[in-house]
Amino acid sequence: MIADAPEEYCRQLESYLCRKNDGHLIRIVGPAFEQVCGWATRGIPMKVACRGIDRYFERYYAKGPRRRPVRIEFCEADVLDAFDEWRRAVGVPAAGDADADGGADEAVRKPSSLPAHLERVVARLTSLRAGEDRSLDTALDAVVRELDGARAAAKNIRGDARERLLDRLRVLERELLQAARARLDASTMADIEREAELELASFRERMPADAYQRSREACIDRIVRDRVRLPVLAFE
């Protein structure tokens, strides 16, 4: 969701950063304010910005005990990277971001191999099967069995065989998302649809109707995936 004004957007992110910093308030003022206002102007949804902040904190915690509160400026590369991923996932147009965030994306995004991707997907799906919610067990079991067989050969797969595997991953992702949607009640789906529309609100005016509807469906899928904690199966 994008706040009504950049000032409100900054205030909400300031509050979020304060919570992440265990209550230590770091004001977003001066150059940091201009920086965060730029995120609002680009249309970066609040939840996407928070996801980028979370990524920075994950790396910060991984380095050991924290020594000082995190400033919002430190999170920009992760925020822009999260926004780029979100934008490509839901298909919204860039709004003059190519020069502004390209360098940050390259600095944060790491190359990934198909075998490594499959390893991560199988690990995530296996952990889901061990959770309290067992409503997707049948679908998850089938996917894990299939990917277990595929990942052994993924290292050396080439050409048409590789393309068939990539196509199959897209099909499996769609089937899992459909299964996940089917287990959500009407009220939950209505909430998800409203959330998707809020995320896309700042882009709607600049998108043709058919493109907006495709982006809306993709955004709904992303929110469903996040709520159910499904990994991204497709590999580009």
Image (cartoon, rainbow, N blue to C red):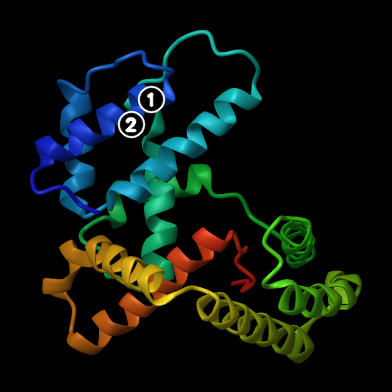
Numbered circles on residues, count: 2
User: x%, y% of residue 203?
Assistant: 19, 67
Q: Nearer the viewer, residue 107 or 198?
A: 198
Q: Amino acid at mark 2?
A: Tyr
Expressed as whole percent of the image width and height from the top left, the position of residue 117 reads 72, 62
As drawn, 9 above or below 236: above
Q: Residue at image x 29%, y 47%?
A: 46
Judging from the image, what secondary structure is the residue with disc 1 in?
Answer: helix
Q: Residues within 10 Å of mark 1 (few under 14, many from 20)?
A: few
Looking at the rendering, which quadrant does residue 32 occupy?
top left
Q: Is residue 81 left or right of residue 121?
A: left
Image-based side of 108 in relation to 12, left or right: right
232 vs 49, left or right, is right
In the rendered structure, which amino acid carries the disc numbered 1? Answer: Arg
User: Which image quadrant: the C terminus?
Assistant: bottom right
How packed mark 2 is, by other alpha carbons closer than 10 Å (few <14, some 14-19, many 20 or more), is some
Residue under numbered circle 2: 16
The residue beneath circle 1 is 19
User: Residue 218: horizontal and vertical position, in percent?
Assistant: 40, 75
Write the residue at 27% across / 52% down.
Answer: 44
Classify the position of the N terminus by image quarter.
bottom left
- Disc 2 and disc 1 in contact, CB within 8 angstroms: yes
Residue 34 badge: none
Q: Residue at x 62, y 78 (%)?
A: 176
The relative height of residue 112 versus residue 60 in the rendered view (above or below) is below
| One can see residue 90 in this view | no
SS label for mark 2: helix
Q: Position of residue 10 (x, y in %)?
A: 19, 34
